[in-house]
Image (cartoon, helix red, strand yellow):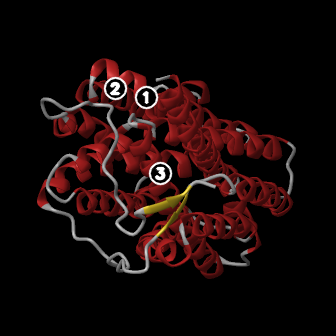
Amino acid sequence: MGRLKESGASEMRPVRRARIAVAAVFAVHGAVTGNFATRIPWIQERLDLSAGQLGLALAFPAIGASIAMPLAGRISHRFGARTALRGLLALWTVWLVMPPLAPGLVWLCGVLLIFGATAGMADVAMNALGVEIENRLGRSIMSGLHGMWSVGALTGSAAGTVAAHAEADARLHLAIAAGVLTVLGAVACHWVLDLRSTPEEHPPPRFALPPRSALIIGAVGFCAVFAEGASLDWSAVYLRDVMETSPGVAAACTTAFSCTMAGARLVGDAVVGRFGPVRTVRTGGVLATAGGILVVAAPGPALAITGFGLIGLGIAIVVPLAFAAAGRSGPAPSQAIAGVATITYTSGLIAPAAMGSIANLTSLTISFCLVTALALGLVAGAGVLRTPAGTDATGPAPHTDPSTSRATLS
């Protein structure tokens, strides 16, 4: 019996090591976003962009991601998960140097299109590895992995806040960040699972139409991702333009938002295990709605920053729960999860442009009234995330990548 236990522990050790490695990959991915988000006001000022023009440009990362995401499965099928993730993550981190170099709006849109494409493909690859590890461990880890993404975003936004306070040129700041994150990402990828397809397996389909059961679940994810994208991309601009704060304080608002997102996701698995997904999301919706009201009604920056923090706290674990619910929603879990992913990325596509367009026609304050309304939608829609009787709310999600059936743990 003792030898069996030792053998089991030995077999699980590479999986646990791979979990740490993929958590580091999530953090690196988030750090790219955090660094970039805090320097959006610098880019807007340098190019003299209006709110509508900035909103148009910020729609292009989601366009790029939506176009390129279906390619990630084929790349992993061709090269293996570890090699694919290493290459895709490096493309994402290196491309961080490009947005502040854009000489005009058209160039910025093109740069951000590629920026989003590399981000989306790396995102698919690392989430597929996270699901595989979750299956092997037999317990939920996805909320924690998304929490590490938020930790990375927090770290990146903190670095951006320091750079903004020092009035550092964003071209130098983001070039240094890109170099550091590329090295860290390469080191982390060395230890992830090396999933490889067998020769007789067919490549995964390019697109997966979502089954009807996933549409409502996707709508809940849509509300959360819209609020997240709007807050991450526009919070610093809101503090600078509406609250008339300094660039450093404006960047600190993005940091506060990322901080609450990170904290909530890191404890998310335990919270859902205690209270269940429906109660957790419903309570989160109330907090996010209160945060949105505080943002639009705040007389000063302190209360506005608090409001953004509440939005982050409320929406933090909705998307991981939406993916888990999609996996339980029908006989084709892979198709359902792909459908929910498509809907949530569509939300990321719509959010920046919608916020900018509304701000251009009315005001940025009115734009965040829409965010508040969508946060309230989480309260109404939380019931679709209910766990069926006899299943574990925090159990692992089903395997979502049919092209990765064999693994090498070395």
* Distance between the alpha carbons at the discs numbered 2 and 1: 6 Å
Label 1: state its secondary structure: helix
In the rendered structure, are the residues bearing label 1 and label 3 in contact, judged by CB atoms less than 8 Å apart?
A: no
285, above or below 352, in the image: above
Observer-nearest residue: 268 or 378? 268
Q: Can residue 261 be seen?
A: no
Q: Residues within 10 Å of mark 1 (few under 14, many from 20)?
A: many
Residue at 32%, 38% in the rendered image? 375
Secondary structure at badge 2 equals: helix
Q: Is residue 296 positioned above or below 328 on the image?
A: above
The amino acid pointed to by label 1 is: Gly
Q: Position of residue 348 (x, y in %)?
A: 42, 59
Kind of residue indicated by mark 3:
Gly
Residue behind mark 3: 229
Element type at mark 3: helix
Task: Name the quadrant containing residue 157.
Answer: top right
293 or 258, nearer to the observer:
258
**In the rendering, which numbered label is found on residue 218?**
none
Residue identified by numbered label 1? 268
Task: Write the residue at 86% across / 60% down.
Answer: 172
Nearest to N terminus: mark 2 or mark 3 = 3
Q: Of discs 2 and 3, which sits in the foreground?
A: 2
Q: How many residues crowd mark 2 within 10 Å: few (<14), some (14–19), many (20+)?
A: some
Disc 2: which residue: 272
Q: CA distance from mark 1 to mark 3?
A: 20 Å
> How far across and down, in percent of the image, does residue 397 sit?
32, 45
